[in-house]
Amino acid sequence: MKMSELVKQGKEVFINNYKQFPIVFERGEGAYLFDIEGKKYLDFVSGIAVNALGYSDMELNQALKNQLDQLTHCSNLYYNKPSIDAAEKLINGSGLDKVFFCNSGAEANEAALKLSRKYAKKNFGDDKFEIITMKNSFHGRTIATITATGQEKYQKGLSPLLPGIKYCEYNNLEALKSTITKNTCAVLLEIIQGEGGIITINPDYLKAVRKLCDENNFVLIFDEVQTGIGRTGELFAYQLFDVKPDILSLAKGLGAGIPIGAIVVNSKVAEGFEPGDHAATFGGNPLACTATNVVLDKLLKGGLLHKVKEQGKYLNEKLVELMNKKDNIIDVRGFGLMQGIALENEDIPSIISNCMKEGLLLVGAGSNVIRFVPPLIISKNEIDNAIAILDKWL
């Protein structure tokens, strides 16, 4: 079937909630995707920071095939070894104590919101329910997580939203202090605001927020759905700043394309949940956790984390060089292999579309930013090729 015919069929059968490009992908290899007509695309989107190992990673594929022959699901009424192994690796890598597995970033943040309220009410009274999140943030598409998202454009037409969520300016400690009330129980923030435009956190602010939460018995939640699992050059972005959360939410790269999410929690806050308080039917299934084990082993034992640091430094150098050439680039920001360029008075969709025609996949962030979140296996040569294509259209 021709590409145009499949695109037409897709428009007929899918709900119109995505603005999809008229491309049908068929397979992937390394950092490249191939459409059904054989055209090759260098992928700097990686499923929006999901496909950490790129495409057709032999070790990942073989591990998944082996697990398929054994067991894909058995429910959380019972234990399975892949999930125990994956949880142990997350605990050792994070310095936290307990894990809950789910299926997505929105579910991970949903669990974090519930746990923070449960813990606060259990220990400090029923009036502890307010959660402070940041303006310009993004935390998911459920009613709770879209409420936690500090951007009105995502909330339009969904009122009434979840009560008890307040917003304050990111990187502004005084704004946070002024938002606190006697009902506050938690603070939720991203180390890099991804969908908000690759806005990085101020290290002094982050440390001050940790101190403020400790002084007031607030639960501090880091949403690392996009920044986690090696994306910034550390296993978790908060490790760049030596500040630890009470709850850490994860997804995206955690399964390298196999749907999985998680929260990792310190032992104190973990006691907020008791049997029956929260669940995920497919959470921690052996297939998804097999993928997680491969990803974590490659990052922590296979040298991939070191490679991300090297390639992230190189990507930054090339983006800064590009900024020095182009008057319309006003900023380069981010860490590791999660970076962005902010543009002045540019049509971001047109730039992305033109690059796509030349075989480079890019994605926007915020209103004026092009985001770079390639597979963690990206090479310097592939970074050079991406910059060369982008250079033509800026």
Image: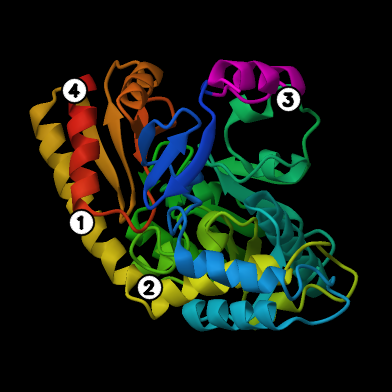
Q: Is residue 245 left or right of residue 124?
A: left
Residue 16 in magenta? yes
SS under mark 2: loop
SS under mark 4: helix
Count of labels in the image: 4
Locate residue 273: give its quadrant.
Answer: bottom right
Please name the residue that numbered disc 1 is placed on.
313
- Rate crowding at label 3 as few (under 14), some (14 to 19) or many (20 or more) other CA atoms within 10 Å: few
Question: What is the three-letter code of the residue carrying label 3?
Answer: Phe
SS under mark 1: helix
Image point 58% across, 22% down: which residue?
19
Please name the residue that numbered disc 4 is placed on.
392
Depth check, mark 3 against mark 1: the one in front is 3
Please name the residue that numbered disc 2 is placed on.
242
Q: Earlier in the sequence, mark 2 or mark 1?
A: 2
**Residue 128 against residue 145 in the figure, above or below:** below
Locate residue 64: give its quadrant.
Answer: bottom right
Image quarter where the N terminus lies is: top right
**Distance between the Cα atoms at labels 3 and 1?**
40 Å
Q: Earlier in the sequence, mark 2 or mark 4?
A: 2
**Distance between the Cα atoms at labels 1 and 4?**
23 Å
Q: Earlier in the sequence, mark 3 or mark 1?
A: 3
Question: What is the three-letter code of the residue carrying label 2?
Answer: Asp
Q: Is residue 387 left or right of residue 139?
A: left
**Distance between the Cα atoms at labels 2 and 1?**
20 Å
Q: Nearer the viewer, residue 231 or 4?
A: 4
The reply to whether callout 2 and callout 3 are in contact (CB within 8 Å) is no
Please name the residue that numbered disc 3 is placed on.
14
